[in-house]
């Protein structure tokens, strides 16, 4: 992986914070050829790391990193209480950011950072490490392909006699990893949570907690975390109707992921367990942290959305805060269905908004529309009747989605996009009703100001450029340049459209506002001047 990365242009990053985990990040980014600087408040630590990583600059000033034009990405590995301000400053300085978990300590702060990253067009990635572990990726594929059957029950144990903390409790220190994995494996937010724990070493800091997550699908999950345990255990168990899976991260690589094809047979009214031999799932041995760091560099270089982006971090925050409330109150806590103040937007009574949806101020959601978990909708959008969006779809500000449109996972709309009535998006190239292809979803990006006409079809895996115009009924199966006018089946470019929506003639002057454009080549147009 190092050779592959260093053969290309490697983004330059700086690591802020070099404590226990920060040192691991320093080591990996240095090995990937990306480490430009290290920032820490302790001079002796900086000297030690400078001696170990020759040629890497060290500083005690975070402001030095933010003002350095050679640094493209900031890696924040400080205590969680400092994350919000440090990430905000980095985004405002137009740096891409990789922040260790948790993204923030409150839902509101997490949402604000996610909004700021979108506005600034910056990469914001959260260090939910397990999603870069081969065992978790294999588990996701097994579930997506139906190999476990219907998931019924999940439990996770993260236990150790390890580093004890006083600045955060064990729920916030250990459980973010498990919450992240469970939400992602199930593609669902819990309806409610319960939690209990014990404060044995410090009066106000829980050393052990057990959290129960209840999902509308009927799945139940529990998370047991403790740093007062006689031995280390990191185990995730998925109980399905066809097979059970066990991910034991303390086991050797050949034994980390195991399937148990046990079944239950009924003898009259009595269930009888039918046990079967366990089978190992082969995994490629890698260092998950190295893969995570490499993924961040790829996202910075390619301007791609991270697998563990800010929106995923906000969903995890929602569950953690609900668990914290349940821990404090001793009562079941409902997970907020919409992580935005209800009076900021309008949703018709017939609309369905699932848990884990974020809706911006002034947005309107009309009759019989359904917004699925993980969807993020910006401000001042109009969502027409009978629209389905999600899960995990990102929509910018000032977008208009007309009636009878479905936006599936993998679709991203930037600001000011217009989707005409009954236009169609796909996320699989070759769908079959009898073949599970969730692992083959392809992304579609619709850039700022684009217009998609009624009944047009957008084949997945392509990018529609800024202010392009897709005629009604066209079938787009290629990338579309900025300002391109596309018609036909399959769609082809027949001209150019201005940002104001006027078709450009040979003089390339907008007939609506007089803006002048020029062709860079046969497939590229740029704006030369503002309106005259």
Image (cartoon, rainbow, N blue to C red):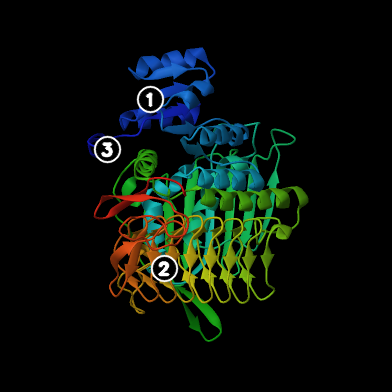
- Residue 374, picture quadrant: bottom right
> Residue 501: x, y in percent?
45, 62
- The secondary structure type at the circle numbered 2 is loop
Nearest the eye: 485 or 346: 485
Q: Give the CA distance from mark 2 to mark 3.
A: 36 Å
326 to the left or right of 163: right
Q: Nearer the viewer, residue 76 or 513?
A: 513
Q: Is residue 49 visible?
A: no
Q: Is mark 1 on a helix, strand or loop?
A: strand
Find out whether the residues at labels 1 and 3 contact each other: C-beta distance under 8 Å.
no
Check the image and report above or below for 349 versus 329: below
Position of 471 compared to 321: left or right?
left
Q: How far apart are marks 1 and 2 (CA)?
A: 45 Å
Q: Residues within 10 Å of mark 2 (few under 14, many from 20)?
A: many
- Examine the image and state in which quarter residue 129 appears: top left
Image spot of residue 112 (x, y percent): 61, 45
What separation in Å lies between label 1 and label 3 (alpha carbons)?
A: 15 Å
- Residue at image x 66%, y 47%? 108
In the picture, measured across the screen, residue 198 lies left or right of residue 304, that is: right
Please indicate, yes or no, whether residue 443 appears anywhere in the rendered image.
Answer: yes
Residue at image mark 2: 148
Earlier along the polypeptide chain: callout 1 or callout 3? 3
In the image, is residue 199 above or below residue 490?
above
| Residue on which the image places disc 1 | 36
Disc nearer the start of the sequence (1/2): 1
Q: Do the residues labelled 1 and 2 touch (CB within 8 Å)?
A: no
- Density class for disc 1 (Cα within 10 Å; few <14, some 14-19, many ≥20) is many
Q: Residue 5 carries which label?
A: 3
Q: Do the residues labelled 2 and 3 touch (CB within 8 Å)?
A: no
Quadrant of image for the N terminus: top left
> Residue 298: horizontal and vertical position, in percent?
34, 43
Other-residue count near label 3 (Cα within 10 Å), few / some / many at <14 / 14–19 / ≥20: some
């Amino acid at each position: 992986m190092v050779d592959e990365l260093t053969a290309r242009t490697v983004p330059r990053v700086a690591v802020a914070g070099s404590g226990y985990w920060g040192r691991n990040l320093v080591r990996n980014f240095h090995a990937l050829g990306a480490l430009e600087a290290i920032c820490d408040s302790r001079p002796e630590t900086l000297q030690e790391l400078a001696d170990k990583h020759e040629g890497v600059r060290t500083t005690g000033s975070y402001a030095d990193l933010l003002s350095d034009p050679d640094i493209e990405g900031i890696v924040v590995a400080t205590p969680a209480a400092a994350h919000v301000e440090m990430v905000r400053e980095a985004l405002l300085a137009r740096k891409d950011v990789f922040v260790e978990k948790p993204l923030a300590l409150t839902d509101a702060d997490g949402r604000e950072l996610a909004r700021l990253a979108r506005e600034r067009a910056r990469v914001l990635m959260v260090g939910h490490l397990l999603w870069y572990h081969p065992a978790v990726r294999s588990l996701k594929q097994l579930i997506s392909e139906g190999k476990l059957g219907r998931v019924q029950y999940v439990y996770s144990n993260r236990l150790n006699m390890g580093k004890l903390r006083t600045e955060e409790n064990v729920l916030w220190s250990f459980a973010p990893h498990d919450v992240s994995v469970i939400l992602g494996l199930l593609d669902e937010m819990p309806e409610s949570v319960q939690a209990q724990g014990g404060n044995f070493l410090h009066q106000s800091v829980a050393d052990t907690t057990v959290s129960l997550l209840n999902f509308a699908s009927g799945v139940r999950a529990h998370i047991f975390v403790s740093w007062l345990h006689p031995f280390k255990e990191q185990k995730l168990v998925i109980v399905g109707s066809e097979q059970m899976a066990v991910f034991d991260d303390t086991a050797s690589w050949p034994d980390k992921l195991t399937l148990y094809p046990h079944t239950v047979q009924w003898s009259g009214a009595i269930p009888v367990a039918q046990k079967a031999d366990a089978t190992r799932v082969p995994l490629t041995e890698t260092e998950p942290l190295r893969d995570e760091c490499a993924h961040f560099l790829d996202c910075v270089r390619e301007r791609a959305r991270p697998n563990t982006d800010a929106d995923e971090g906000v969903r995890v925050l929602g569950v953690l805060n609900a668990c914290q409330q349940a821990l404090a109150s001793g009562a079941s806590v409902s997970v907020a269905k919409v992580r935005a103040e209800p009076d900021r937007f309008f949703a018709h009574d017939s609309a369905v908004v699932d848990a884990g949806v974020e809706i911006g101020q002034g947005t309107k959601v009309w009759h019989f529309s359904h917004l699925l978990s993980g969807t993020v909708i910006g401000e001042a959008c109009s969502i027409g009747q009978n629209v389905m969006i999600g899960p995990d779809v990102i929509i910018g500000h000032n977008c208009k989605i007309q009636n009878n449109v479905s936006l599936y996972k993998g679709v991203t709309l930037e600001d000011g996009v217009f989707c005409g009535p009954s236009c169609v998006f796909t996320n699989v190239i070759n769908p079959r009703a009898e073949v599970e292809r969730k692992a083959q979803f392809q992304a579609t990006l619709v850039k700022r100001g684009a217009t998609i006409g009624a009944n047009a079809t957008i084949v997945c895996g392509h990018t529609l450029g800024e202010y392009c115009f897709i005629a009604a009924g066209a079938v787009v199966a290629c990338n579309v340049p900025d300002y391109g006018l596309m018609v036909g089946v399959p769609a082809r470019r027949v001209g150019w459209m201005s940002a104001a929506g006027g078709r450009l003639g040979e003089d390339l002057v907008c007939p609506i506002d007089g803006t002048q454009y020029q062709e860079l080549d046969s497939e590229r147009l740029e704006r030369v001047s503002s309106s005259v």
